[in-house]
Every structure is written in C-alpha cells, then in structure tokens.
Amino acid sequence: MKLYNLIFLATFIFLCSAETSAQTPSITLHVDKATATVSPKLYGLMTEEINHSYDGGLYAELIRNRIFKDNKNTPEGWSLVQDDTAAKASIKLIAASEERIPLDERGNAINGALSTCLRLTVEKAAGKVGIANEGYWGIPVKPSATYKASFYIKGTDRSEPFRWPWEPKPNTPPLPDIENNTAGPITVSIESNDGKTVYASGTINLEKSIYWKKYELTLTTAADVQPTKDARFVISTNRTGLYYFNLVSLFPSTYNNRSNGNRTDLMQMLVDMKPKFLRFPGGNFLEGPLITDAFPWKTTLGSLENRPGHKGSWGYRASDGMGLLEFLEWTEDMGAEPVLALYAGYSLGTDHVDAGVLLKPYVDDALDEIEYVIGDTTTYWGAKRAVDGHPEPFKLKYVEIGNEDWFDRSNSYSGRFNQFRAAIEAKYSQLTCISTIPATQYPSMKVTGKEPDVVDEHYYRDSWDMWENASQYDTYNRSGPKIFVGEWATREGAPTTNMNASLGDAACMTGMERNSDLVIMSCYAPLFVNVNTATATAPKAWQWDSDLIGYDALNSYGSPSYYVQKIFSHYLGDKIVSATVENIPVQSAPLTKEDSTKNIKSKSVPTIFYSATMNDTTGTIYLKVVNTISKKQTIKINLDGVTKVSPEATVVVIKGDKPDDTNTLSNPQKIIPVVTSVKGIEKSFQQSFAPYSVTVMQIQAK
Ligand code: AHR
C-alpha cells in the first residue's frame, strides 16, 4: 500500500472512531427545566392484514380456507385422505364461480356468504376416506391442548339432478349412482401429515338429511404429546355417499377465552408492549386494490356464517374473522384505544371518488362505522354492536381519513378530507380527524382551508437515513398540526429486523420522544409476519421484509426492534427533560458507486442518540442512549438542577455483537433486554455504553 493511501486510511479510521475523539462526549440534562409534557399516547401499534397477520397469525382460527373461497379453481389448503387404495373417492370445489353456478352445483349454498363448498365423493368405501386441511403452514399440536372444532356438513346420494328438457347435460360423463350411506359416525381428528399418529380425535353422528347442519365437538391432546406443527386436520368417513362441507373451523384456546378470539402468545407479546392505541385496519388493507375491495366493515360483523371475506390487499383473501368488533375487542384487551382508519374514497389502483354527491355514501358509511364504535344502544349501529356482544361503547378520540392519500395524484384529497371532517365533526365534535397528507412532506397536495389538527407521516428508511433524520422534529414548526407517525420502520433484515435496524429505530424514537409535545402518537409497521417460506402446497407467507414480530403455527419471537419498542414504551416519564450535548462523535455514511459518479458527498451522522424524560411524581429520570458503532463509548452525564441523586441506577441494555445479529424462531432470545444496576451515580458521572446498544438508565433524583 502506498504511503498516502496509508495516511488516508489512518485518517479515515481516526474520523470514524468514536473512542479516539479528542474530548469525552457529554449529555447535560436540564432536569429542573422539564416542563413540556410527554404525549400520553406516544407509543401504540399499527396493524393490517399483511404477511398473514391475522389469517395464519393473530386470529386464532387454524383452518386455512374454511369457506373455500380463497381460490376459484382449487380447494387451496385441502386434500383428499384415502388410506386404502381399494377405495374410490375424490374432492371437488362446488359453486366456486359465483357469477355462473352450474346446474349440478346449485342448491348447495348455506346463505349468500357461504355459497362455495367442498364435496367429498365416496363412490367405493374401503378404510378411512376424508378431507384434510393443512392449516396455515401446519396445525399446531401442544400437550393437553383443547380445540373447538365445528363444521357444516350434509350427506346425499348421487343421482342425476332434475333437468328441464332445454337444459344441456354436462359434457363430462356423470358419476354412477352412489348410495347415500352417509348417516352415522364421522371422525374428526388432528393427526400427523402421514396419518400415522393421531394427536386428538372425536366423532359426530351425521344425521340423514339433505340439508346443511352444523356440528361441533371438542378435541383434546394428551399431556405427553410432543409439540409439533407437522399435523393436519381431518374429517373422515368409511361409507359411500356425497359429503358436502362448509365453514370448517378449529380454534385452540384464545386470549381471555374469547370465542373467535386471538392467539395467546402473540397477544401476550403485544400486551407486554403496553401500547396506548391500535391503528387499524390499515394501511393498504383499508383501501384495497379497487374501490370495491375496501375494508368491508359491515360484512365483518356478526356470526362467521355471515362473513364472506374479501379480496384483501396483499395477494391473498381475507377471511374477515378479524372483523371490526374483533379489532375493537383486541384493542380493549390490550388496555389501548382505537385509532380508526376510515375508507375515504381512494384505492391502491389509483381510482378515487370525487368529493360531493359521489362521495356522500362513503361519508355516510364512515358515520355508520363510528356509530358502531361509540354509539349508545339507542342508535341503530350501537344496538347492532350490543347484539354482537358489546353493549358498552368503545372509547374513540382519533379517526383517520384514508391512508397515504399522497399516492392519489388527482389532487382530490383536500376535498375528500374536508367533506369527511365536516360530517364527522358535525355529529361527533369530540373526535379529531387525522389527515394522511402532511404538508411538510407533500406541500402541493395538502388539505386547504382549515388546517388539520393532526397529520400522519409515514417513513420506511434504512439505518443511515434514520440516523440522519433522527433530529428532524427538533426544528419543526410548533404552531402547525400535531404529528402522528402512523407507519415507520428501519428496513434492514428479513423477515424480521436485525440489530442494526433496531439501532435506527431507537435513534428515531429518541427524536420522537424529545419532541413528544409535537409527535403525539407513533406506531411501527408492519407489526406481524408469518415467517414460513413456500412449500409444495402453500406460498411464502410474507410480502414485506423487516417486520416486528415473527411466528409460525407453533412459536413466536420478537425482533430486536420489538424489544426496543418495548423498553421505550415501558421506561417513559411524563415530562420531557431537555438536554445539551457536546462532542458527540460522528461517522460518515458509505458512498455508493452511483453517489461517487454523481459527486454526492458523504453525510456524517452522530454515533450517539439520546432522549430523556422524567416522572414528575416519583422523580425517576429515564435516560435513553443509543450507541450505533462497534466501539464502546463513554459519556459524561451531568444532571443539572437536581439536589439529590440516588447512587444506584437501574440499567436496561439491548445489544448485539454485530449489526446483522438477529432473533429467529430457533434462536428467539439472542437479543433481548438485560437489566442490571450500576453504582456511582452522582450529579456528574461517566457511563460506558456497549457497542451496538440501546440503553435505558433509570436514575432516581430529586
Ligand atoms: O406497512 C406496509 C404498507 O406500507 C402499508 O400497507 C402502507 O400504508 C404503506 O405503504
């Protein structure tokens, strides 16, 4: 290496090295000047049906494609079970094309929602014959587990259906007549995929009737069963006939024992985050690809029998088992409040509905939806909510008008927002309407007339961008709208984020926290990811890399970002403690080839990020420090304006050995918060912060 190269390298290393910085960095907390209030709703959650967040995720239903509408061409998730080759049997999707149902398939709808079903034809019986569901990448089997199984079934014979003389006969040769031998025991089981091990089993007694009937039973596994997800759900017979199935459901126990409820492990992880609100139902899931695909809240209410599901926005159909009431009850179970996103006449395919008479039905629909949430039981929709099982109105303060309407290049948002806001404020003056277009990001599309009280900013960045922008709110105009950061994340790592991403997140959150007089709410996105890759029968489960919480059918884990969210939410005061910093080392973002050709200069970003809040009543100071580099950094911390400091502080640290360290299903706790205590805390003291770490110090002062 030439001498000048060596000199350049040495200089570069020197500049990048925080430890070699000439003077010790310092953070001085002005504890006596802590007057600005931390937003009581600063940390919440955002959710939508993406990455199998509900179907195959939080929503505890274990049967994939339970009403057979997921795919018009094939009974996705279902297969024929046939133990004995001497048997003659087949399965067929019936009435899958709702637009044109063949004559032979008519008469099989249970109602308008349950109009597609699965037929098992047993022409010749021998051994066990049935239908199997593979679940969402497996059916979870755990020791001493209880499952509620239910399904609609009817059994018939096979004979030529009545045809008018002018009606054509089908081209395919009809099956021979099959005797209706269907009445009698039907076996229901959870078993290994090869059928050799039965983990739980029971029977129902199928009555002889040509009409649909719902059967229910409970299945229980043995105490010594080994947990597995290599299992399937089977309904089987040993008799001839035509068996029709619909709304096949299997629920394990759920959080708070809610019927049609949520998975317990995932709920616990959310509750542990102490979220103050839940933003739902999207995200893109609110809007749908076309106007007709928007979240159909009215058909997500009531019994599952009345829920047809809908297209969804992320390439798979939504069962809508997670309906409006389930979202609200989920929010309630976490001790949080809803932030209800209302469909506002713009969908992802770029179609929009103009403000005025065309938009009026959408505004009315939103008013109905709000009434369902907060109307008392004398109102039409409040009464419906009571019938659905929740007479008490829910709490609601914020409604959001649309989602990411900056994608709507028609410039229609201002008119649409104003029409929604006028109608909502006229009926519900206590509600605040959030605009999805922040003027700071999209000045040409902003809402005109009366300024929105709150705007929703979204950003998905890499860690360098997060570090560069972590102080963005320090200089924001305080006389404009309040900020709701309704979606944000550092996108590094897949399917869940890595340590480096969590350092980007933590830096960003220190900025929100320092400015939480302005940033009143924030929520990371996406929240959930089913981490299964494609199998022979099911596609890859996720559509979006870098998510917060990962799981399969059996287990779940938090990403490093999850733990950062958790400790930021846990250790939070009610007053913002302002601070002065000195000598914070910086590092330079690497330049790409393209940057160099465009002569773009490398930006330098701090290597330490911080925020401090205090509990006004107890005097506890929560100092958060993020060290983004590979070296330990020592910081001098001064507590200005305190008279007494407890010599011992509790320290919570999340750290990694390298930026791409992460948690996985097989190593779920590689990066988790570790709590210790440190001594020697005084009005001025030095503290070391580990490489690649996020630290919360709880200092007791007066
Ligand atoms: O969080 C994933 C998607 O990102 C959301 O659905 C959408 O609002 C945003 O563009």
Image (spheres, rainbow, N blue to C red):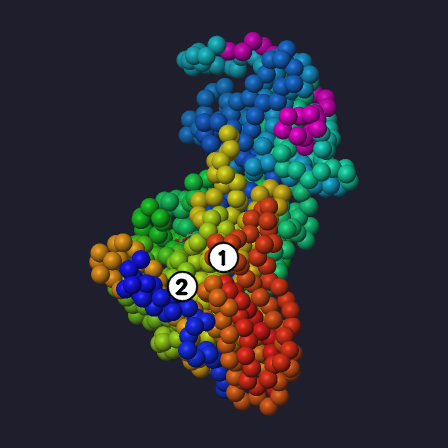
The kind of residue tagged 1 is Lys
Instruction: Say whether residue 190 is magenta.
Output: yes
In this rendering, the answer to whether 7 lies above or below 547 is below
Residue named by callout 2: 466
- The image's mark for residue 177 is none
Amino acid found under the numbered disc labelled 2? Met
Answer yes or no: disc 1 within 8 Å of ligand 1: no
Dot 2 alpha-carbon crowd within 10 angstroms: few under 14, some 14 to 19, many 20 or more: many
Q: Give the side of residue 114 with respect to residue 353, left or right.
A: right
Compare residues 418 and 63 and report the one nearer the observer: 63
Q: How many numbered discs, if any? A: 2
Q: Position of residue 124 (x, y in %)?
A: 63, 12
Marks 1, 2: nearer the viewer? 1
Residue 383: % across, % down: 58, 55
* Residue ID at (25%, 62%): 600
How far is the residue under mark 1 from the one under mark 2?
Answer: 18 Å
Residue 531, above or below 426? above
Q: Do the residues labelled 1 and 2 touch (CB within 8 Å)?
A: no
Please give the range of residues in magenta: 174-197
Residue ID for mark 1: 658
Q: Which residue is drawn at 36% across and 74% down?
A: 476
Q: Residue 507's image quarter? A: bottom left
The answer as to whether callout 2 falls within 8 Å of ligand 1 is no
Q: Main secondary structure of the magenta part?
A: loop
Task: Tell me, yes or no, whether the highlighted magenta stretch contains residue 305.
Answer: no
Q: Position of residue 222 (x, y in %)?
A: 77, 37
For label 2, the SS is helix
Residue that protrudes farthest toward the left in the picture: 598
- Please report the residue visible at 77 percent of the width from the left and 40 percent of the height from the top: 223
User: Does residue 79 appear anywhere in the picture?
Assistant: yes
